[in-house]
Image: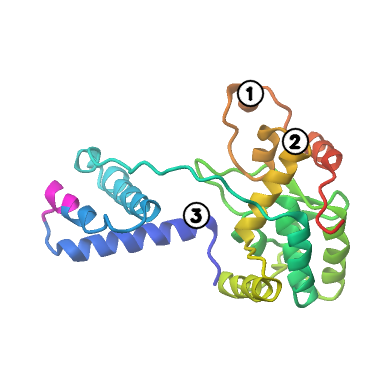
Amino acid sequence: MNKTLEEATVYGYKRIVIDFLKSVNKNSITIQDIASYLNSKRELSKGRYSNILKSLRVFFRDYLKRPEMIEDFRFPSIEWKPIAAPTKEQLQLFYSKLGPLRDKVLFLLYATSGLRLSEVLQLKLSDIDLSKRLIRPSIESSRTKHRLCSFYNEEAEKLLRDHLNANDFSPDSRLFPINETKLTRMFQRASKKSGVKVTAKTLRQWFASEMALLGVSDAYIDAFQGRIPRSVIARHYLNYSEERLKEIYDKADIRVLS
């Protein structure tokens, strides 16, 4: 069974907390116990270490209501690394090595909507307005993840309609009933054949980069990709109606295959 974003996050936090409790193996936990556990994880990447600390913060602060147990532990500083998104030519080569229609539809939806990996896999027919090429993902949001709506381009539209015509979907049917492991393997096969490494996250990064090159502001790119607006102007004064978002999306005219 596929997990939503929130379910996957909770599951990951739970596994870390269970690992911590097993390492302590006693009823009364001290701050030193937490320090010893975190010190044993120092050799991990900064990202993984931060995720462990984040999990323990949620556990002590929000679940046990003992924020004083965890508040003195600090997250490591993570060096920013610039992202090198693939070129359109590289994506076209990758696309040429994809297999059946379903795989091509998935590729184009990721590349032209900016959706997250799980958001596309959880899409149902009722989440899509075919007349507007509009997507309203039903996946739940969190404090930092939100969803207004996004769109897909005309290249994706044609293949999506072919995919729908080839299958009998009810409004509540998932359009792509595969799990993340199978999706990853699909990308890995095409990456090996094409020599271009592409993942769902790569396509999300490419979407943001390409939209910026096409003149779309950061605030609207954030909206398409489900991020909460960061500035006061973006939060309180910009127009985020579906009509306005579609106008901006269509004007950008993002394309992958041409």
Q: Which residue is mark 1?
A: 236
Please state the horizontal and vertical placement of residue 39, each as a whole percent of the image. 21, 54
**Element under disc 2:** loop
Residue 36 in sight here:
yes
Give the mark nearer the N terminus: 3 vs 1.
Answer: 3
- Packing grade of label 1 (10 A; few <14, some 14-19, many >=20) is few
Magenta span includes 59: no
Q: Which residues are magenta?
A: 28-35
Q: Which residue is mark 3?
A: 6
Q: Of the numbered discs in the image, which one, if any, rests on residue 139?
A: none
In this picture, residue 229 sits left or right of residue 35: right
Q: Of tags 3 and 2, which is closer to the observer?
A: 2
**Element under disc 3:** helix
Helix, strand or loop for the magenta stretch, by majority: helix
Magenta span includes 33: yes
Q: Say above or below: 246 vs 5.
A: above
Q: Which residue is mark 2?
A: 216
Please state the horizontal and vertical placement of residue 160, each as a whole percent of the image. 82, 64
**Element under disc 1:** helix
**Residue type (three-letter) at the residue carrying disc 2:** Val
